Amino acid sequence: MEEESNIGLDWLSPRETEVYDLLSQDLSPDEVAKRLYITPSMVKQHIYNGKQKTGARTTIGLAAAVAVKKSEQKRS
């Protein structure tokens, strides 16, 4: 997971962060869409945008990076 260590998570919108947080909880894009009351295609668009903004190569890697950042924020 070296690629994710330098991801600029501050560039993500609050909604993108929310989407990745739910994905990191092992929810599918369809489950995320239902939980956030958005369409599955909107979830996919958030995934695409987040990867473009951060340079992440994988959805799983970015979801894990968001989970780590949230965990660090809780400890501070």
Image (spheres, grey):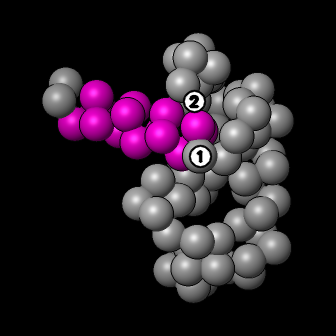
Residue 13, horizontal then vertical, whole percent:
63, 45
Query: Going by the image, does 66 lie left or right of 68?
Result: right
Which residue carries the number 2 mark?
Answer: 9
Residue at image point 59% right, 39% down: 62
Query: Going by the image, does 60 lie left or right of 25?
Result: right
The amino acid pointed to by label 2 is: Leu
Q: Residue furthest front?
A: 1
Residue 60, horizontal then vertical, whole percent:
59, 46
Tag 2 secondary structure? helix
Position of residue 23 relative to residue 48, above or below, is: below
The amino acid pointed to by label 1 is: Ile
Position of residue 64 relative to residue 21, above or below, is: above
* Quadrant of res 58: top right
Which residue carries the number 1 mark?
Answer: 60
* Quarter of the image where the N terminus is located: top right
Is residue 8 rendered magenta in the image?
Answer: no
Magenta highlight range:
61-74
Residue 38, horizontal then vertical, whole percent:
67, 79
